[in-house]
Amino acid sequence: MAKKVFILLLAVNALLVLFIVMNRELSIADSQSMSFIQEGKAVEVVSRQLVKSKRPREGECGEVGPAVATEVIEQASKRLVARNIANELYEDDVVVSTDYWVIIPPRPSEKQAYRLLKQLQLANIDSYIVTQGDYANAISLGLFTVKSSAYRIKDKMVSAGFETVVQEIQRTQKRYWLEFSGDSAIVSDALLDLNLNISHKSCKSR
């Protein structure tokens, strides 16, 4: 009888030890699972921060224009100011056409210029005297829009013994622009009906 009781006690002790060991392993597994979940959260936050750092900054820079009328560009500037878009107006000149003026350089005096003019007219060469400006007392032989035509007249006159040159006369047009710093989507919306080009460029470091 005593032997049976002893064996029963051993079995109970073995079960108790097994229960304690299994409970401890479960606790460790739960702890590891929580640690993994926490790591997952940490990785997710870092990923969001990296993505955010790659987004372009809200401030953008660009140009609006060109406009050939000051009224248009001034209206554009006022619209941008009303939408808190900083902008600055500037202007430039662009060559829109070039003419070619064929002349015999200025004579030392008006009298000599008229004497040469008479000689040219007797030869049926279209010409007239320039009476004022930097080329006063020069003989004009024509103004041409085609370069080759001007040089053909020049070469003909030189061959006839007359000193002749071609002066390029550039005709320019003033253009007006806006430089802006701000959201380009707002700029596009504000200026939609003004038919102005909007281009982007790097912001100047301040």
Image (cartoon, rainbow, N blue to C red):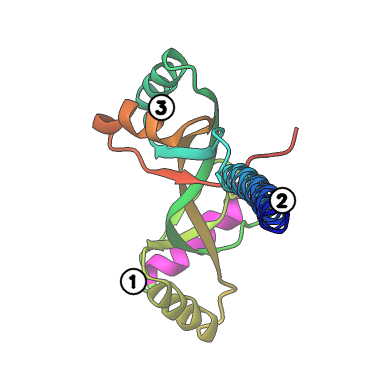
Q: Are marks 2 and 1 in contact (CB under 8 Å)?
A: no
Image vertical order of residue 148 relative to residue 126, above or below = below
**Which kind of residue does numbered mark 3 sit on?**
Ile
Residue 11 found in image quarter: bottom right
Horizontal arrangement in the rendering, residue 62 relative to residue 66 (left or right): right
Q: With respect to residue 57, does 37 lie above or below?
A: below
Q: Which mark is residue 124?
A: 1
**Mark number, residue 178:** none
What residue is at 46 percent from the left and 68 percent from the top? 119
What is the C-alpha distance between the residues marked 2 and 1? 138 Å
User: Residue 132, image x and y in percent?
Assistant: 55, 41
Q: Badge 1: how crowded within 10 Å, few (<14), some, or many (20+)? A: few
Q: Which residue is mark 2?
A: 13
What kind of element bears circle 1? Answer: loop
In the picture of the structure, the residue carrying the numbered disc 3 is 73
Which amino acid, by three-letter code, is at mark 1?
A: Asn
53 left or right, relative to 184: right
Marks 3/1 in contact by CB < 8 Å: the verdict is no
